[in-house]
Image: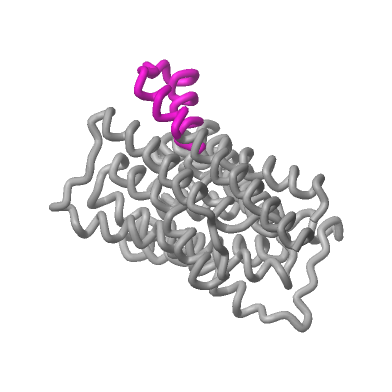
Amino acid sequence: MNSSGLKLAYFCAVMNAMIMGFSFLFTKIALDFAGPMDTLTFRFAASFAAMSIPVLLGRVRLNYRGKKLYKVLLLAILYPLVFFTLQSYGLQHATSSEGGILFAFTPVLTMLLAFLFLKETTALLQKLSICLSVSGVLFIFIMKGGGIDWSNMTGIVLLFLSCLAVAGYNVLARRLLKSFSPAEITYVMLGIAFLSFLAMSLAGHTATGTLDQLFSPLASGTFIVSILYLGILSTLITALSSNYALSRIEASKMSVFSNLSTIVSIAAGALLLGEEVSIYHIIGSALIIAGVMGTNLLGKKSERRVSNRAKTG
């Protein structure tokens, strides 16, 4: 693997976390104007339309001939369909803090699934680094007064399953990227998500007799800006970049970068909403960064030792 491709993969992973860190803020803004299903419909409409333009112009070439497309369909079902659906319903029964705490365990789930299905192995120091990153997120949420209320079992189970869906996506995408390009996988994902959420949104409005209200949020410039951020940056760009990163980096290493979004969310809240940054935010952020660096850098060192032994042996 060439070093430039690997550097670009790590850049994509960090960029993903930064974009996702701001997405929570824009999601909150969008939900002031439209319900969760309508927001998802417009979000994926924007992302699918944005990618369709270069595809139709021939700037992005897709070739599905002779490839097992049903596997990409399964991938699209895991994420974004299952993930967003479970997350939306899960957050109706649980708090956003509980969602953040549970989502922090996604790298651990990814590591386990990657070991089971991809035979990816991680050194002890890498496992400890992943746990260190998770502990940083937990520390921030617990110090904020957040925790898990085990009486909300419905919400907790749904949120846990949503994290499992993301972990499954990371592992399956890693395998499929050997035969599909990142663009080919991304385009199918976005198309299926858009059509599915549109169907659910139309069904919901038809049932309640509010079909005329579907496009009313588009009268707000604030809503449009939020949707463009969520659809183009937080969906299309992150999907392309994460799929590219997964084609170069092991699933367990890639997934731990998601915890960096917690740091970006703190910074976004401080810069844009004037929220206070406390010492526990700084301590938790340091733990997250140390965990992410340890998972990737320590892995490189251990891999070099193995290759050096192989050469001298």
Pick whichever, 62 or 310, lies toward us.
310
Q: Residue furthest right?
A: 58
In this picture, is 109 found above or below 143?
Answer: below
Question: Does residue 124 appear left or right of residue 69 in this picture?
Answer: left
4 shown above or below 118: above
Residue 190 coordinates in the image, percent (x, y): 60, 60
In this rendering, the answer to whether 111 lies above or below 279 is: below
Find the residue positioned furthest to the front. Answer: 313
Magenta region: which residues?
Answer: 260-287
Give the residue drawn at x 37%, y 54%: 87
Residue 148 visible in this rendered orientation of the protein:
yes
Which picture quadrant has residue 83?
bottom left
Q: Is residue 269 part of the magenta span, yes or no?
A: yes
* Residue closer to the observer: 189 or 146: 146
Q: Is residue 211 left or right of residue 249?
A: left
Of 220 and 304, which appears nearest the observer?
304
Residue 223 visible? The answer is: no
Vertical relation: 201 (above or below) 99: below
Residue at x 71% of width, y 58% of height: 309
Prevailing SS of the magenta stretch: helix
Q: Which x, y percent locates residue 100?
A: 36, 43
* Quarter of the rendering occupied by the C terminus: bottom right
Q: Quadrant of the N terminus?
A: bottom right
Locate residue 237, reporting x and y percent: 66, 47
Furthest toward the left, the residue is 151
* Quarter of image, res 69: bottom right
